[in-house]
């Protein structure tokens, strides 16, 4: 049975010097239709209650994530470890009733709290981007 680290190496090899020409030629943009198709196949498997196919299709979506992360790594943008860390940070931040001291409310209250946290994240990101732009302009 393969492990997650071995899968990462397989993806790296597929895009490596002696890898697959198709995989090596892919870009974020060229993979958009593949990602959409694979996500739709996951939805279809869920709707059909086809658990065996669901497992395979989730693997195909994971392949898309790993390919995008490998491309980003090659471009010096981010790594799969960054994707995992970013997701983990987000899940902790958005679940203060699990990882913090907030009380769990109703489903509606928790959905509202999730949206409040998400909005605050977007605002913080927007403010950070504006600050970065100002700093860049100041240096010119």
Image (cartoon, helix red, strand yellow):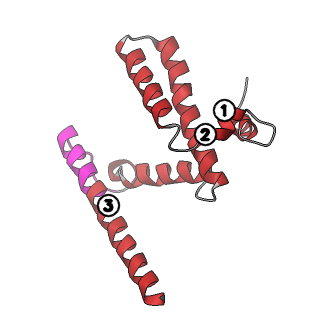
Do labels 2 and 3 touch, CB within 8 Å?
no
Question: What segment carries the magenta color?
Answer: 101-117
Query: Could you say where residue 95 lies in the image, as x and y percent from the top left?
Result: 36, 49
Name the residue tied to disc 1: 22
Q: How crowded is mark 2: few (under 14 residues within 10 Å), some or many (20 or more)?
A: some
Nearer the observer: mark 3 or 1; the answer is 1
Query: Could you say where residue 76 lies in the image, as x and y percent from the top left?
Result: 63, 59
C-alpha distance separating marks 2 and 1:
7 Å
Residue 52 in the image: above or below residue 135: above
Q: Is residue 109 magenta?
A: yes
- As helix, strand or loop, the secondary structure at mark 3 comes to helix
- As drawn, the label of residue 26 is 2
Q: Which of 110 and 57 is in front in this view?
A: 57
- As drawn, the label of residue 103 is none
Q: Is residue 104 magenta?
A: yes
- As drawn, the label of residue 122 is 3
Do labels 2 and 1 touch, CB within 8 Å?
yes
Q: Residues within 10 Å of mark 1 (few under 14, many from 20)?
A: few
* Picture quadrant where residue 117 is located: bottom left
Q: Earlier in the sequence, mark 3 or mark 1?
A: 1
């Amino acid at each position: 049975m393969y492990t997650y680290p071995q899968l990462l190496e397989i993806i790296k090899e597929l895009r490596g010097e002696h890898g697959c020409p198709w995989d090596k030629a892919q870009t974020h943009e060229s993979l958009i239709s593949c990602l959409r198709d694979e996500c739709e196949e996951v939805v279809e498997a869920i709707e059909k209650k086809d658990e065996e196919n669901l497992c395979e299709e989730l693997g195909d979506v994971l392949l898309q994530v790993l390919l995008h992360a490998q491309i980003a790594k090659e471009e010096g943008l981010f790594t799969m470890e960054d994707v995992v860390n970013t997701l983990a940070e987000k899940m902790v931040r958005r679940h203060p009733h699990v990882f913090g001291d907030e009380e769990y409310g109703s489903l509606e209250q928790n959905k509202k709290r999730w949206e409040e946290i998400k909005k605050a994240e977007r605002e913080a990101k927007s403010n950070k981007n504006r600050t970065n732009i100002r700093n860049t302009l100041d240096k010119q």
